[in-house]
Image (cartoon, helix red, strand yellow):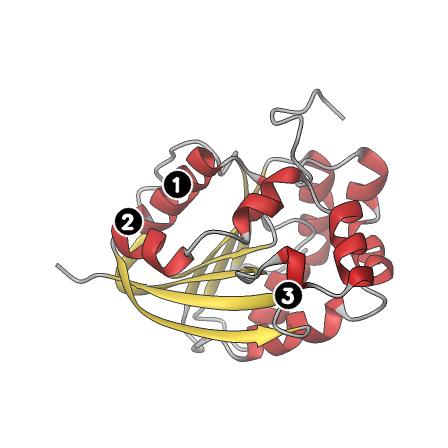
Amino acid sequence: MTEKIYPDSGVELKDFVAKNYDRVMNIMSLGLYSGFIRKAIKQMDIQPGSSILDLGCGTGRNASLMAKYMSENGHITGMDISELMEKQFLKRFKGKANVDFIKRRIDQPFDLKKQFDIVFISFVIHGFPHEVRNTVIQNALTHLKPGGSFYILDFAEFDMTRMPVLHRFIFKKIECKYAFDFIERNWKVILKEAGFDNFSEHFYLKNYVRLLKATKVVK
């Protein structure tokens, strides 16, 4: 693994974790990760012809679940900076003409010269400093069609001091310091200021995890 860009972040993975990411997530979540991911994606408004940009797509596990709701007219573009994730993603979608991968950082401004119906990001944005999160949000806004949907699947807003002792211990052990800041912010206000509205949300894992949907304002 190259030197971390954000030393205090937990989203820049060591090579072993990147190579075994899906298995590691299953173990760390005691088998719960797969279930709520499936449920969350089912609750997204994915249409057969949807075009989706998956930011920080990792191994393509989430993209493969989203693809089940799409026809050959739909399209998914995965974006990640990790070469190890890229290899796993491309292997998973070998021969699939309507899925592609772009190796690029999502924490810096970029322009793909096209817009999507849906931009999705799962358990990535909490691992960045807040000023970097704003860049990720602007990238999502830039690449959404007017009225398009931005889905953030990540930790919900909650008071860590009120968590049961065991849950709080696990959260502190597993997560980076940026996550502690993430859960304290009002993400509907942040997204509204960025150019989104019409929010909806679904909660999982005792309300510690949320799928937040925000719609790009039509001007």
Q: Regarding mark 1 in the picture, which secondary structure is present there?
A: helix
Q: Give me the C-alpha separation between circle 1 and circle 2.
A: 8 Å
- In the figure, residue 94 lies in which quadrant? bottom right
Farthest residue, direction top: 3
Give me the residue at 68% from left, 35% from top: 12
146 with respect to 203 (left or right)? left
Q: Quadrant of the C terminus?
A: bottom left
Asked whether the viewer can see residue 28, the reply is: yes
Label 2 vs 3, first from the N-terminus = 3
133 with respect to 191 (left or right)? right
Q: Nearer the viewer, mark 2 or mark 3?
A: 2
Q: Give me the C-alpha separation between circle 2 and circle 3.
A: 29 Å
- In the figure, residue 207 lies in which quadrant? bottom right
Q: How many marks?
A: 3
Q: Quadrant of the N terminus?
A: top right
| Disc on res. 64 | 3
Asked whether the viewer can see residue 70, the reply is: no
Residue 99, compared with residue 181, is above or below; it is below
Residue 92, compared with residue 33, is above or below; it is above
Q: Please give the residue where the numbered disc 2 appears in the rendered image.
A: 194
| Tags 1 and 2 touching, CB below 8 Å | yes
Kind of residue indicated by mark 3: Ser
Label 1 vs 2, first from the N-terminus = 1
Q: Give me the C-alpha separation between circle 1 and circle 3.
A: 27 Å
Q: Nearer the viewer, mark 1 or mark 3?
A: 1
Q: Regarding mark 2 in the picture, which secondary structure is present there?
A: helix
Give me the residue at 61% from left, 46% from top: 179
Q: Please give the residue where the numbered disc 1 appears in the rendered image.
A: 134
Residue 214, compared with residue 194, is above or below; it is below
